[in-house]
């Protein structure tokens, strides 16, 4: 894989649909005050991972000369 292809792949990173739906469901339950302790821990982990992916994607897009 070329360096550019690798950066393109990183720039296209997203949560799988199922994980994205789970994150949204947890955020909705959190808004409604309905999270269990385990769900809160899951939400925090997914949110942290989402932020990390967003930062890495932004850096890849910058290398490609694209806006995030």
Image (tube, helix red, strand yellow):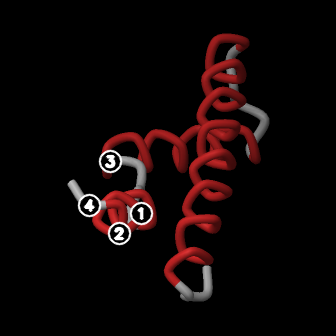
- Residue 17 image point, x, y percent: 31, 51
Q: CA distance from mark 2 to mark 3?
A: 23 Å
- Residue 64 image point, x, y percent: 50, 80
Q: CA distance from mark 3 to mark 4?
A: 24 Å
Q: Is residue 57 above or below residue 18?
A: below
**Residue drawn 26% across the image and 60% down it:** 2
- Where the N terminus falls, by quadrant? bottom left
Q: Is residue 28 above or below residue 68?
A: above
- Residue 63 image point, x, y percent: 57, 74
Q: Are circles 1 and 2 on residues that touch, CB within 8 Å?
A: yes
Q: CA distance from mark 1 to mark 4?
A: 9 Å
Q: Are circles 2 and 4 on residues that touch, CB within 8 Å?
A: yes
Q: CA distance from mark 1 to mark 2?
A: 5 Å
Number of marks present in the image shown: 4
- Where the C terminus falls, by quadrant? bottom right
Give me the disc on residue 2: 4
Q: Give the residue at mark 2.
A: 4
Q: Are circles 1 and 3 on residues that touch, CB within 8 Å?
A: no
Callout 3 secondary element: loop
């Amino acid at each position: 894989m070329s360096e550019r292809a690798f950066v393109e792949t990183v720039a296209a990173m997203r949560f799988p649909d199922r994980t994205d739906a789970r994150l949204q469901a947890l955020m909705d339950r959190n808004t409604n005050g309905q999270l269990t302790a385990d769900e809160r821990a899951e939400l925090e982990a997914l949110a942290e991972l989402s932020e990390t992916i967003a930062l890495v994607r932004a850096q890849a897009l910058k290398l490609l000369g694209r806006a995030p």
